[in-house]
Amino acid sequence: MVVAPPSFSAARPEAIVIGAGIAGLATALRLVTGGFAVTLLERHAHTGGKIRTVASSAGPVDAGPTVLTLRHVFDELFACARERLEDHVTLIQQDILARHFWSGGSQLDLYADPEKSADAIAAFAGAKSADQFRRFNNRTTRLFQAFDAPMMQAPAPKMAQLVPHVLRQPDLIPAMAPLSTLRQALRRQFSDPRLAQLFGRYATYVGGAPHLSPAILSLIWQAEAAGVWVVQGGMHRLTEALTKLVQSRGVHLKRDAHVDQIVVKERRAVGVELGDELLSADTVVYAGDPRALATGSMGEDLKIVAPQTAKLPRSFSARVHSFAATPQGPPLAHHNVFFADDPQAEFDDLMAGRIPRDPTLYLCAEDRGQDHPPPTLERFEIISNAPATSTFTPPVDLDRWHHQIMQRMADMGVTMSPTPTAATITTPQRFAEMFPETMGALYGQSPHGLTASLKRPTAQTPIKGLWLAGGGTHPGAGVPMATLSAKHAAEAILSGQTSTSTSAQTAMRGGMSTA
């Protein structure tokens, strides 16, 4: 075993961040800005994690998140390094948040302006439905404002703190509908089942089903209602910009770096093993799915970290189809949703571990919403929910499924030329292979149940010097939430920035042999 010479000193503590997805990049930037010497380790050849691309004849196509919401989270991230987000990426705010399609030709656009959305709903489903939307929008605005500080912005929310917060504002209780699922609440709020189906879809943004997710998840609507931005060139431009920024600040980035284990000595994280190399550090941040720690894949000593993640059900995964083609049919927005005819059947299939027979399809027209006409050959991403899986074995039904979804799109009036092949579909099995111990789940543990959000691991762990960040930790899944998790971890580390260099070096040399 070769022990890398410690480079840290009392004046500049050393941090290792494992995983260069959005959370790892954000953590690295905050720590290096705060005075740490940071090494960022990424097991793949590219940074970005689930913000990734596949090649196409029209250039790289996003195969993960497609838009930016809660922009203030990213403005604050860049500001911590005395930079401006707009100096690193070009953002284009969308007037149309999403365009929705149903069989039979029904179509509805939702807008950044809530009154514009209400007018569109009135034309779509009548004045009564528009009034119902206004009440829904007001209710979810209230919920978002009420729970932003004590839940999302809090590093470790507790039920004992949330209950008094709610009791001081009794009007929150009916807005939360604590005894209802999201589907039940929406069915009471909307007389038109299409609108209940539409807003129930937000449960899938955190990998859940509306009939099993708590009603309070309706506040996810406000993440989009507060503004949707397209990153010019694709979402991967954001992580590319962050990668360049952290490197310019001195972060040492090592790609193709597979971490065998996190080294623990006397219940303290003191470094990581990379093959026959041992890197020492004062602080280690694991910015991957915490289930990898709970299952012991990063070392037996770490099974005490986030043990619930090894037991609780996993969120949904997805089949993601990325390709280039020329579309024909109705005009597309950047965000487009083609709804299943039977919304409950889709979720029944998912909960039974089956690929839905009639899935709702999300289509991102990546070159739309860019303030200029799209090129002839456009980039597209189709996302369909799928169950998580524990196997890496490729599915045998891809060709049949691919034909099914392309036929479904054609039935809704949208065809692609040339017809894409199944070669660029990313499956849950592939996600499981790319992101160890996730079971292919894209959002960590399941959001089902009233207290699911309080069961997520937080940044602090029972191992001293080891911290967590990422979509599998509090405050949850999605690019803004994963970025907030990095803030929670970095602020906790920086607030207790007493140097432990001497003790870390002693532990490394006393606990490991050199070869």
Image (tube, rainbow, N blue to C red):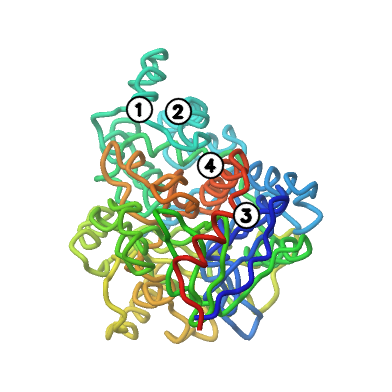
Q: Are marks 1 and 2 in contact (CB under 8 Å)?
A: yes
Question: Seen in the image, is 145 located left or right of residue 228?
Answer: left
For label 1, the SS is: helix
Q: CA distance from mark 2 to mark 4?
A: 12 Å
Q: CA distance from mark 2 to mark 3?
A: 27 Å
Can residue 415 be seen here? The reply is no
For label 3, the SS is: helix
x and y, in percent, of residue 255 in the image: 60, 76
Q: Nearer the viewer, residue 102 or 211?
A: 211
First in sequence: mark 1 or mark 3? 3
Can residue 133 be seen here? The reply is yes
First in sequence: mark 1 or mark 2? 2
Please give the residue where the numbered disc 4 appears in the rendered image: 223
Res. 375 image quadrant: bottom right
Task: Indicate the amino acid at tag 2.
Answer: Leu
Q: CA distance from mark 1 to mark 3?
A: 32 Å
Please give the residue where the numbered disc 2 appears in the rendered image: 143
**Residue drawn at x 45%, y 58% as measured from the top left:** 337
Please give the residue where the numbered disc 1 appears in the rendered image: 176
Q: CA distance from mark 1 to mark 2?
A: 7 Å
For label 4, the SS is: helix
